[in-house]
Image (cartoon, helix red, strand yellow):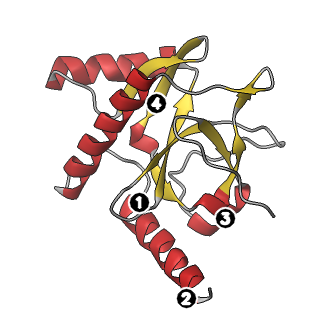
Amino acid sequence: MEQAELKPGFVYHIKDSYFETAQDSKLMRNHEGGARRPTYFCLRDKRTQLLWMVPMSSRVEKYQPFVDRDVEKFGVCRKIVIARYGDRESAFLLQNMFPILPKYIDHVHTIYGRAVPLEDRVIEEVRKAFGEVRRLHSRGARLVFPDINRLERLMLDELAAEEAHK
């Protein structure tokens, strides 16, 4: 199967085969019945070259209380970013992010048949939160639900195996 073309600043859908490989019950999986949700914003880790997927949700009202609670308690919410995508607000769920290889990306998300990029300021806001969550995670903070250490090792091992077969 062909690999999807990756374009910076766009939103994607992931193949079911990733979830079969990852075997992590904390991952937000594709909805059953062929539905292509959730959508994922993609960031590249410059150090490892792995892609990191940040699930997105249009159910902002579900996530806003968590953002409000963290802002009240810590002055900021790093786990969830509420920002505009397309014609509405979306919740970028860094608390559910995970690493992936390009071969597991199915296709770019479209709205009315057109791929819609995120605004530059939204990309920077999510990228900044991503960096902060990664730094805090490396210091032992439990901000992310999936086992991203194991998933990162799994993807790096898979990448190394692919490179060895070239």
- Which residue matches tag 1? 147
- Report the Cα–Cα distance between label 4 and label 3: 23 Å
User: Helix, strand or loop at disc 2?
Assistant: helix
4 or 3: mark nearer the eye: 4
Sequence-wise, the earlier of marks 1 and 2 is 1
Q: Are marks 2 and 4 in contact (CB under 8 Å)?
A: no
User: Residue at the location (33% across, 62% down)?
Assistant: 47
- 94 lies above or below 162: above
User: Helix, strand or loop at disc 4?
Assistant: strand
- Which residue matches tag 4? 92
Sequence-wise, the earlier of marks 2 and 4 is 4
Q: Position of residue 67 (x, y in %)?
A: 33, 21
Instruction: Say left or right for 53 vs 153.
Output: right
Sequence-wise, the earlier of marks 4 and 3 is 3
- Which residue matches tag 3? 20
User: Helix, strand or loop at disc 3?
Assistant: helix
Q: Are marks 1 and 3 in contact (CB under 8 Å)?
A: no
- Report the Cα–Cα distance between label 2 and label 4: 35 Å
1 or 2: mark nearer the eye: 2
Q: Amino acid at mark 1?
A: Asp
- Which residue matches tag 2? 164
Q: Amino acid at mark 3?
A: Glu
- 4 or 130, which is in the foreground? 4
- 114 lies above or below 37: above
Q: Residues within 10 Å of mark 4 (few under 14, many from 20)?
A: many
